[in-house]
């Protein structure tokens, strides 16, 4: 098994006195789907930012064997696709098509090849009808699917997602969960929607106060009521007897 | 509906119109842009008393409305911004320019009245021309045309990005305004105690938003250059359209078509 | 203060396009030298914010009316003059293209009147010198007072310059018969009132930003950094504007948000007349192009410009003009009928 993402003793703080990431170490293997859970402010977004090289901390982070540091950033970022929580921030081009082309063209992929990729991704996600739509005219659900498409068009080896199902209606939540399930890439998904994590991931990392307090198969963490409540979380709805 | 919501509707309306299909919509944006600019320039170049000679210029927007199927009513709602000002400036002309210029059935009409009406007609014609341009051309096609015409890439990209976020921020501000007025019923505007913080809060959030937007660009390999969809070719039809438009404008400007038409009947 | 196309002659519009275009070119050049790729999204979001923010009505205490923010000063204080200028261009372009607020041909003039003065004059001659000075002493409170002073003075001065330019451009275009002096006398005081209000609102927003994130406000912590002849230049600009505004003009408070409109309507109502002591002949400037166009017209058209036609032939040409116009109307109606039939067939 090839390691795609690894964190070794990573520490980080915005202000010296308040560490946001404390001694974080884990590895993610090729093809794994990992859920990143934790209460608000636990450090989920910071962990993603460290991985993407948007902020720099201490310790060693590698992606596909390449260390995340300023000299390697273009290479690291070509391997990673990041789906932002707010699709409006992600989709800055006029149309879905141009947004999807943005990444590949910047990576010097020839236009024909990029076009082919765009069509493939649109077909795989079953959203071909969105291709020439204007970004500012999409519904919330369509926007989220299109944002996922812009990332997949870059053919990343790993996909990071920040709350991919937030603020979606039940229908589009289903659509997005199905799309995530169908993606073959390594996945790291940060979310509060534990039912979605249950549906899409095999392994779960539980963060609290910038530390990884649990790391294991979803069955052992997402069904452990005591563990979850200890860290200000609740069982997935499907396991709650209400 | 507050002002921001009204503005959003107006933006959406223009988008919908531009997304329609017609022989005019299909013309290349460069042809439409240049013919519009030519039209406005010619209209503005008519002297202040040349009301009669100006009238044939109205045929172009009329024909365009017909060919494109764009509703005239939408256009006339937009007159509310332009017309008051133009009318106000024009209203002085009858006061200061009282010399009779023409006689209509024995009634003397002063030069000021003619120039006032001419000014208003010019205002309406120019507005219709630029409205028709935007109602038949999407912003990305227009920006592609501007790039082809060698406008600096930075300005064109800025225009597209700003247009994209105009909708996002206007919507956010519309919600904030509604929220404000729900808690401050009876207030017409923002109270002085919230002058700084109301927009200031959004401003701070927007700067974070800009940061995140930049991150999302960098993560997808941005290094100072935007790639846009290639523009369709400038066809012979586009060339013909542009040449025909400019030719007709020049003809109407140089030859008094109205006088000639009238001369056919009246001697 | 958005000017419509009809208020400008093609020559004046072209000159204003050239001036604004050159300034934009220089700004782009300077921004490229700075090479800050994160600037572009910030400019776009800033421009979108100001576009939306200009729609907010701020209640002016003690009156029933409302004011707005001044985009030029706000953007240049946050983004710097060059980036602020380009952002303002984009805002004005969107207002013109999608809302018909200001015209396509008048865009160059509108950019000059609202963006150039607000960003460059406002920043280099007012904002920066004041913030770098030691006015009001030291400490955060002093900075806040300097921000307020710079915003208010900046808005007043730049609006005065903008309003004066509107008058100048309209007069040079030969659009209005209103004597230049009288036009100025009406525009300036109203924009003085608007400038004070816009300055106050803009100051409030900038003070809030300064207290929350001081690093976002340009020159906020630059007190004492030498700016050559700083306060002197402020005084110079202020003097120039006072001269413009002066001439015994009284302060007029406006209840109407748009001073230009008010100026013109207000004037019409009060029956303004020539006895302002300003001679129309001396101030009513005519553009060369208008003159040339007029002589061209005289050769070809039936209404010789400026000449008073003798009644006999005038009656004749008027009739042919009216008949011609009627025929144009018939052609227009025919176009509509044919167009309607065409669309019915194809829908």
Image (cartoon, coloured by chain):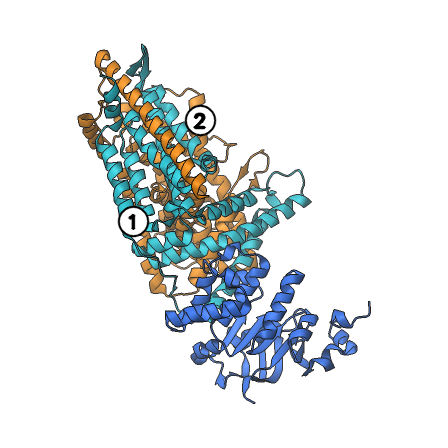
Chain colours: A blue, B cyan, C orange
Asked if one can make out residue B208 in the rendered structure from this viewpoint, the answer is no
**Of A131 and A58, which appears nearest the observer?**
A131
Residue C320: image location, x then y, percent: 26, 19
The numbered dot on residue B237 is 1
Q: Secondary structure at mark 2?
A: helix
- Residue displayed at 48% across by 44% down: C199
Residue C242: image location, x then y, percent: 38, 37
Q: Residue furthest top?
A: B106
Residue B215: image location, x then y, percent: 49, 68
Q: Secondary structure at mark 1?
A: helix
**Of C344 and B224, which appears nearest the observer?**
C344
Q: Is residue C54 above or below residue B225?
A: above
- Residue displayed at 59% across by 72% down: A180
Q: Is residue B150 left or right of residue B7?
A: left
**Of B255 and C249, which appears nearest the observer?**
B255
Contact (Cβ within 8 Å) of mark 1 with mark 2: no
Q: Is residue B143 left or right of residue C9?
A: right
Q: Which residue is mark 2?
A: C265
């Amino acid at each position: 098994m090839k390691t795609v993402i690894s964190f070794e003793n990573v520490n980080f703080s915005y202000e010296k006195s308040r560490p946001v990431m404390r001694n974080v170490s884990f590895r993610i293997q090729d093809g794994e789907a990992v859920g990143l859970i934790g209460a608000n402010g636990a450090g989920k977004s910071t962990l993603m930012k460290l991985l993407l090289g948007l902020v720099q901390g201490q310790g060693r982070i590698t992606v596909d064997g390449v260390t995340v540091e300023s000299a390697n950033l273009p290479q690291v970022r070509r391997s990673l696709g990041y789906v932002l929580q707010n699709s409006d921030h992600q989709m800055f081009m006029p149309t879905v098509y141009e947004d999807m082309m943005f990444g590949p063209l910047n990576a010097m992929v020839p236009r024909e090849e990029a076009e082919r990729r765009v069509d493939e991704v649109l077909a795989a996600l079953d959203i071909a009808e969105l291709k020439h739509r204007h970004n500012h005219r999409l519904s919330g659900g369509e926007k989220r699917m299109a944002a996922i498409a812009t990332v997949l068009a870059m053919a990343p080896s790993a996909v990071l997602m920040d709350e991919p199902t937030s603020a979606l209606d039940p229908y589009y939540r289903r659509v997005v969960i199905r799309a995530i399930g169908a993606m073959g890439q390594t996945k790291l998904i940060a979310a509060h929607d534990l039912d979605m994590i249950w549906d899409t991931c095999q392994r779960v990392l539980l963060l609290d106060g910038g530390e990884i307090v649990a790391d294991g198969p979803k069955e052992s963490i997402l069904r452990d009521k005591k563990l979850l409540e200890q860290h200000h979380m609740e069982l997935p709805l499907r396991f709650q007897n209400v | 509906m507050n002002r921001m919501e009204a503005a959003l509707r107006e933006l959406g309306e223009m988008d919908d119109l531009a997304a329609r299909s017609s022989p005019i919509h299909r013309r290349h944006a460069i042809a439409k842009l240049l013919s519009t600019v030519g039209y406005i320039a010619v209209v503005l170049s008519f002297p202040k008393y040349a009301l009669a000679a100006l009238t044939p210029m109205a045929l172009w927007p009329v024909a365009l409305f017909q060919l494109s199927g764009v509703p005239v009513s939408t256009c006339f709602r937009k007159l509310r911004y332009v017309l008051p000002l133009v009318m106000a400036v024009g209203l002085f002309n009858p006061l200061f320019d009282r010399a009779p210029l023409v006689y209509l059935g024995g009634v003397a009409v002063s030069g000021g009245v003619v120039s006032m009406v001419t000014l208003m007609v010019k205002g309406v014609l120019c507005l219709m021309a630029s409205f028709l341009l935007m109602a038949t051309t999407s912003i990305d096609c227009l920006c592609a045309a501007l790039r082809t015409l060698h406008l600096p890439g930075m300005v064109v990209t800025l225009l597209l990005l700003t247009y994209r976020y105009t909708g996002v921020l206007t919507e956010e501000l519309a919600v904030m305004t509604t929220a404000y007025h729900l808690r401050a019923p009876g207030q017409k505007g923002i109270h002085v105690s919230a002058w700084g913080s109301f927009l200031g809060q959004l401003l701070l959030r927007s700067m974070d938003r800009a940061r995140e937007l930049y991150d999302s660009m960098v993560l997808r390999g941005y290094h100072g250059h935007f790639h846009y969809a290639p523009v369709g070719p400038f066809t012979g039809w586009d060339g013909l359209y542009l040449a025909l438009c400019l030719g007709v404008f020049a003809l109407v400007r140089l030859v008094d078509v109205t006088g000639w038409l009238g001369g056919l009947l009246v001697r | 203060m958005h000017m419509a196309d009809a208020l400008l002659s093609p020559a004046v519009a072209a000159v204003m396009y050239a001036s604004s275009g050159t300034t934009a070119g220089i700004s782009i050049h300077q921004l490229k030298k700075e090479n800050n790729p994160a600037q572009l999204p910030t400019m776009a979001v800033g421009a979108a914010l100001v576009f939306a923010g200009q729609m907010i009505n701020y209640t002016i205490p003690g009156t029933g009316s409302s004011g707005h923010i001044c985009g030029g000063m706000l953007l240049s204080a946050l983004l710097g003059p060059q980036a602020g200028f380009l952002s303002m261009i984009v805002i004005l372009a969107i207002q013109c293209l999608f809302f018909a607020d200001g015209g396509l041909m008048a865009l160059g003039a509108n950019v000059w009147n609202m963006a150039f003065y607000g960003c460059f004059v406002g920043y280099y001659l007012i904002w920066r010198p004041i913030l770098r000075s030691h006015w009001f002493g030291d400490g955060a409170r002093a900075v806040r007072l300097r921000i307020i002073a710079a915003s208010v003075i900046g808005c007043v001065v730049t609006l005065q310059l903008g309003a004066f330019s509107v008058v100048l451009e309209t007069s040079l275009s030969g659009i209005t018969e209103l004597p230049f002096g009288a036009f100025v006398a009406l525009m300036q005081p109203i924009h003085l009132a608007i400038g004070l209000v816009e300055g106050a609102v803009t100051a409030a927003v900038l003070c809030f930003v300064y207290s929350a994130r001081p690093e976002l406000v340009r020159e906020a912590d630059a007190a004492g950094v030498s700016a050559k002849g700083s306060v002197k230049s402020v005084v110079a600009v202020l003097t120039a504007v006072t001269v413009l505004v002066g001439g015994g003009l009284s302060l007029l408070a406006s209840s109407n948000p748009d001073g230009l409109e008010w100026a013109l309507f207000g004037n019409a109502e009060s029956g303004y007349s020539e006895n302002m002591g300003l001679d129309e002949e001396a101030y009513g400037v005519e553009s060369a192009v208008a003159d040339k166009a007029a002589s061209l017209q005289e050769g070809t058209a039936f209404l010789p410009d400026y000449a008073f036609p003798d009644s006999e032939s005038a009656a004749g040409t008027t009739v042919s003009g009216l008949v011609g116009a009627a025929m144009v109307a018939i052609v227009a109606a025919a176009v509509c009928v044919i167009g309607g039939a065409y669309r019915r067939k194809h829908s």
